[in-house]
Image (cartoon, rainbow, N blue to C red):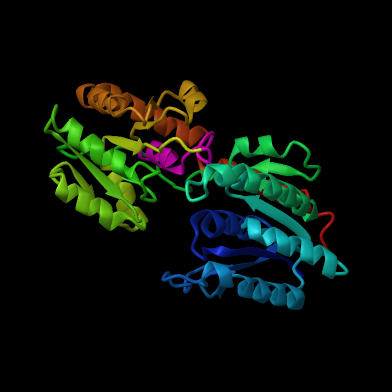
């Protein structure tokens, strides 16, 4: 009989790229496990070709999410999986509960996507005087609950810094793209094109890209910035583009199917990853930068990100995002040095093939799971 894995999130949509299309799919395809994926319903149809059993939860307001925890517990109690792979910090409470209530408890793996203590410490919605007060008890509770886990997966290397005393096995599994591409060679757009793909918010550089378009347009007319993705404030940014009269140079184009979006990347000249300085971003490796590598284009990235990576593979340049002139100058550099941009793009494509792809991370994930095979039922 195949061992059972429950891959669970009470927050993320069922079609989350990392949780379902990368991790759950890799486990189902490479190990002798029957995978059940439990996550939140969205507008994406679950009628897809997959060996994974998909069980959707209703999307609930934050204060009612406990109802989904009850649904998850009932399914765990009735089906008794061998491995439970959790993706939300609030589900650490469920991990503790499972270990207390089940006579033969399953292996529990916690997949840490975000550094929650750092988010609390930098969250603008919380008055600064209360941030440290809230951060400390959360850290104590989190570390106590994590003792119920048999293994921890970190989505970023620097998350380790807050957990030096973890005694269970750990592994870093980065959110690198699962793209199969043989060549980055596609004809470029006639107009020099900067592109951004991903979630759209002020923290992720949306307003900075509008500022860039406005100031760069005072120096050059032959460029455009294409912004692909969704976010709660997209309509606000679109209105600002019109109000500031920069619609000739920047467009917010909404979400696109992956194949179409990737073709836009390939035909663009430079990718943008202009995250504003924030504690939760420091040390991370933005997935979009790896997607730019896969598309064979260089990128401009915030100067607190990927500095060691750029030394190893000089496939992009960095800029201080609090300094608009610095960002404009880096954009001008690429416009005025198209051959350098081409060579950096080729370097990025090589980096993607050699190191920054999901296949490298999949191997680590599978090896990590294999460590538990002797102790699962």
Picture coordinates of residue 270, whole percent (x, y): 29, 34
Picture coordinates of residue 365, whole percent (x, y): 65, 48
Judged from this view, the residue extending furthest toward the right is: 103
Picture coordinates of residue 305, whole percent (x, y): 47, 31
Q: Is residue 339 above or below residue 186?
A: above
In this view, the residue in front, 249 or 373, is 249
Q: Quadrant of residue 19?
A: bottom right
> How many numbered tags mark residues here?
0
Taking the spot 29% from the left edge, 22% from the top edge, the residue there is: 340
Q: Is residue 68 above or below residue 190?
A: below
Taking the spot 24% from the left edge, 35% from the top edge, the residue there is: 212
Tell me if 263 is positioned left or right of 287 in this view. Answer: left
Q: Is residue 141 above or below residue 164?
A: below
In this view, the residue in front, 208 or 264, is 208
Tell me if 247 is positioned left or right of 102 in this view. Answer: left
Residue 106 visible within the image: no
Does the magenta segment cover residue 170? no
Q: Quadrant of residue 289?
A: top left
Q: Quadrant of residue 132?
A: top right
Look at the image and tell me in which quarter the N terminus lies: bottom right
Judged from this view, the residue extending furthest toward the front is: 129
Taking the spot 59% from the left edge, 59% from the top edge, the residue there is: 24
Taking the spot 77% from the left edge, 44% from the top edge, the residue there is: 169
Picture coordinates of residue 61, whole percent (x, y): 51, 70
Look at the image and tell me in which quarter the C terminus lies: bottom right
Does the magenta segment cover residue 283? yes
Residue 6 visible within the image: yes
Give the residues drawn in magenta, as a range: 279-295
């Amino acid at each position: 009989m195949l061992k059972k894995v429950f891959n669970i999130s009470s927050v993320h949509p069922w079609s989350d790229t990392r949780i379902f299309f990368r991790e759950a799919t890799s486990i189902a395809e490479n190990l002798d496990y029957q995978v059940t994926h439990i996550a939140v319903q969205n507008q994406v149809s679950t009628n897809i070709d997959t060996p994974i059993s998909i069980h959707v939860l209703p999307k609930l307001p934050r204060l009612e999410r406990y109802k989904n925890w009850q649904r998850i517990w009932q399914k765990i109690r009735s089906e008794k999986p061998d491995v439970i792979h959790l993706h939300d910090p609030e589900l650490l409470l469920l991990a503790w509960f499972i270990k207390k209530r089940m006579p033969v408890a399953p292996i529990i793996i916690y997949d840490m996507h975000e550094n929650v203590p750092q988010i609390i410490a930098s969250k603008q919605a919380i008055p600064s005087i209360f941030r440290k007060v809230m951060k400390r008890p959360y850290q104590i509770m989190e570390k106590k609950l994590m003792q119920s886990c048999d293994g921890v997966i970190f989505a970023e290397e620097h998350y380790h810094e807050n957990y030096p005393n973890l005694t269970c096995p750990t592994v870093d599994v980065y959110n690198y793209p699962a793209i199969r591409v043989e060549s980055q060679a596609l004809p470029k757009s006639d107009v020099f094109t900067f592109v951004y793909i991903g979630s759209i918010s002020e923290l992720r550089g949306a307003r900075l890209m509008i500022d860039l378009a406005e100031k760069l347009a005072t120096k050059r007319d032959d460029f455009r910035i294409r912004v692909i993705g969704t976010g709660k404030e997209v309509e606000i940014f679109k209105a600002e583009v019109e109000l500031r009269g920069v619609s000739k140079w920047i467009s917010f184009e909404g979400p696109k199917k992956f194949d179409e979006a990737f073709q836009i990347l390939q035909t663009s000249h430079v990718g943008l990853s202009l995250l504003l300085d924030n504690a939760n971003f420091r040390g991370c490796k933005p997935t979009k930068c790896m997607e730019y590598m896969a598309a064979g284009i260089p990128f401009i990235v915030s100067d607190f990100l990927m500095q060691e990576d750029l030394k190893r593979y000089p496939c992009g340049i960095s800029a201080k995002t609090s300094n608009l002139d610095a960002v404009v100058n880096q954009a001008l550099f690429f416009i005025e040095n198209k051959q350098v941009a081409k060579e950096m793009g080729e370097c990025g494509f090589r980096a993607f093939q050699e190191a920054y792809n999901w296949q490298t991370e999949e191997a680590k994930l599978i090896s990590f799971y294999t460590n538990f095979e002797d102790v699962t039922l």
